[in-house]
Image: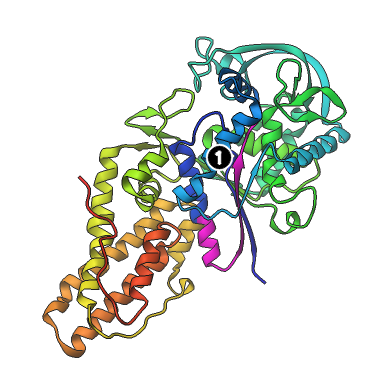
Amino acid sequence: MNNKFYITTTAPYVNAPPHIGFALEIIQADVIARYHQLLGDDVFFNTGTDEHGIKIYRKALEANKNPQDYVDEYAAKFNNLKPALNLSYNHSIRTTDPKHIAATQELWRRSSKNGDIYKKFYKIKYCSGCELEKTDSELGNGRCPIHPNISIDVIEEENYFFRFSRYQKPLLDYYKQNPQFIIPLNRFREIINFVKNGLEDFSVSRLKSKMPWGIDVPDDPEHVMYVWFDALIFYISSIGWPEKIDFDGYWPGIQVAGKDNLRQQSAIWQAMLISAGLPNSKQIYIHGFISADGQKISKSLGNIIDPYALVKKYGIDAVRYYLLREIPSYDDGDFSERRFKELYNADLANGLGNLVARIAKLATNVNGKRITVKFSDVNTKEFSQSLDEFRFNDTLEIIWKKIKSTDQYVNDKQPWKLTGERFNTVLQKAISDIIEIATLLQPFLPDATQKILDQFKSPTITPKPPLFPRIT
């Protein structure tokens, strides 16, 4: 029986069109999902959209739209990423979906029954950009450093609270028992220190009279749930919780998240799971930010890079390759169109593309033998270890070493000067290498590798248009 494997992105907030940062996250998750599919696992690859909260409510009002109409429009923009980036996810859920709403209300009831939800009057400073409470120490000149162009709100009302302070020891115990819970290690240390410094209860509701766009609190029609309480449950509502048909088989799974969500994903969410009596997540992989020529990209700053425009200009696999090869797997990275073109021409046009073209030209009208390569036959320990650790750039470096090695082999053997059996031996070795390279590259460049495998799977091989035409 195949192993069940669950991987999920975060739920991107639909207050703006998709940007390159989320494209990176979902492409990384796609590589891991495709890798496990090649291993023969039963993969449940989930994504979706986060559609409640004050930011969306305000954006809808500004656009003179009903909030549901507003989120319908923007959810479609995120759904269109699937063909645009050649993604393989097989499930998507919106937080306005009735199944998600029912799951969220059920988790609320369980936490409440456990004594973890209570009501109190409070006054806080609140960043609507982060959708988080802020202490004075977290602000600079009265502004959130992540969203400096958004004024801080002061909220003064009676809300429901989650008893987060109760979970310092359970969380620290869990982290100790699961030393690879968060990758990379420096992010894990951050969250351990955050929990060690003490946890404060936080508000999990808003007055419906002030902010009606949210999931109703069970048995209290005057309140809606705070967006972070709602959105995090997306990870389990997507696999059918509280029903057990899919949940018991796939959970816990792997979450892919950005470093700005570290506190919510790996402390708040884990405490909510414990409160509801559910197993914790298996593993959280935290990636960094993408900047553009040294400037941080942010929806709130209005300087996002449009992934649709990049794909239209350079192609799907070129965009996937740049993000996976150039952006560090665990850290912040920089997007530069100049560097994009350099990497494209060096690695894709002159590297992989040129090697495929020259071997196909040598093989024209040559009757060779059919070559079949299984992923399991070429998946080395070095390759699998780097992917299991989410080191995408390192994994691609392993493959590109093989590309360079094959290119050097062809240069050294000079098959164009050979005839007969000597020619056939060199050619068959080169073709075998090309097929092995394409087989390993499938999770990363699915479109280009399928073209390579289709071209070389037959004994009769003919030249095709360049996979990656040079760009200027």
Residue 305 image-quadrant placement:
top left
Residue type, numbered disc 1: Ala
**Relative to residue 358, is residue 65 depicted above or below?**
above
* Quadrant where the C terminus is found in the figure: top left
Q: Disc 1 on helix, strand or loop?
A: helix
Q: Where is residue 444? Give x, y as percent.
A: 42, 56
Crowding around mark 1 (Cα neighbors within 10 Å: few <14, some 14 to 19, many 20+) is few
Q: Is residue 35 magenta?
A: yes
Q: Position of residue 443 (x, y in %)?
A: 45, 59
Q: Is residue 352 visible?
A: yes
Given residues 186 and 416, the one toward you in this image is 416
Tell me if 304 is positioned left or right of 466 in this view: right
Q: Is residue 251 left or right of residue 36?
A: right
Residue 299 image position (x, y, % from top left)? 48, 27
Q: Which residue is found at the position 16% from the left and 70% from the top?
A: 411
Q: Residue furthest left?
A: 417
Along the horizontal axis of the image, is 41 left or right of 429? Answer: right
Q: Residue at x 58, y 25 (%)?
A: 130
- Magenta region: which residues? 32-52
> What residue is rendered at 74% in x and 48% in y?
279
> In the rendered image, which quarter contains the N terminus?
bottom right
Q: Position of residue 291 (x, y in %)?
A: 39, 32
The residue carrying mark 1 is 76
Residue at 79%, 29% (x, y): give it.
Answer: 216
- Is residue 267 depicted above or below 393 in this figure? above
Q: Is 16 located above or below residue 360 in the figure?
A: above
